[in-house]
Image: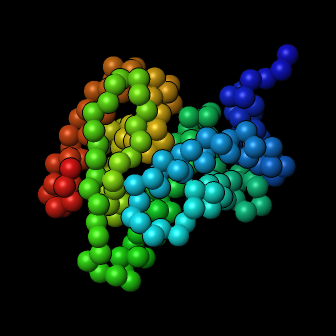
Amino acid sequence: MAQNPTEQVTLLLSRIAAGEAHAAANLLPLVYDELRNLAAARMAKEQPGLTLEPTALVHEAYIRLIGAEGGRADQKWDGRAHFFGAAAIAMRRILVERARRAASLKRGGHMSRVELADEPANATVAPDEVDMVALDRVMEGLKAQDARKHEVVMLRYFAGLTIEETSLALDLSPATVKNEWTIARAWLHRELAREGSGV
């Protein structure tokens, strides 16, 4: 019986974690379109003039996740949702690094608002206008204060997972995910307002 794409991704992720380099070559075609959509969503509201393209962001994030040689025994994923959450984190880090480099070259440049709007319970969340450096600072604060809320935000906001997908990835009930997301979003709004980034 043929495996469905989700099962194929899970199997290949376990093979990559076991150090099978050829598994990475088989994984990329299965996840590329979703990763590119994720990258495009991350970059849609970036500052004008960003030279990085979604394709380049996908490749850089993929190398960070899988390794240049295609197998990282130190990295393990608990299925597809965990992998895409890790991809979202890698993309966020790449964009934050680029934003910091740009800010160091041009102090006081244009900073955009962060929008963490409310959405239907089953909807995915795509980032709106983002000051990536400010958002990164408050996300680190949230992680230090409450790691579970940080994970929920990473999967909902950065990876674009639904409430149900997030609950599966974190082994939490959908009601708990909704509650954590609501509280975390309010906390982030408050902290970003304190930073003067606007909400």
* Number of marks in picture: 0
Q: Is residue 138 above or below residue 38?
A: below
**At which x and y percent is residue 52?**
55, 66
**At which x and y percent is residue 175?**
33, 19
**At which x and y percent is residue 97?**
45, 68
Q: Is residue 9 left or right of residue 120?
A: right
The quarter of the rendered structure image containing the N terminus is: top right
Q: Residue at x 60, y 46 (%)?
A: 35
Q: Nearer the viewer, residue 60 or 137?
A: 60
Q: Is residue 176 left or right of residue 192?
A: right
**Residue at the limit of the structure toward the bottom, as seen here:** 105
Q: Is any part of residue 29 visible from this angle?
A: yes
Q: Is any part of residue 172 visible from this angle?
A: no
Q: Residue at x 60, y 48 (%)?
A: 36
Q: Is residue 1 left or right of residue 180?
A: right
Q: Nearer the viewer, residue 57 or 151?
A: 57
Q: Is residue 2 above or below residue 81?
A: above
Q: Residue at x 41, y 28 (%)?
A: 123
**At which x and y percent is residue 79?**
62, 33
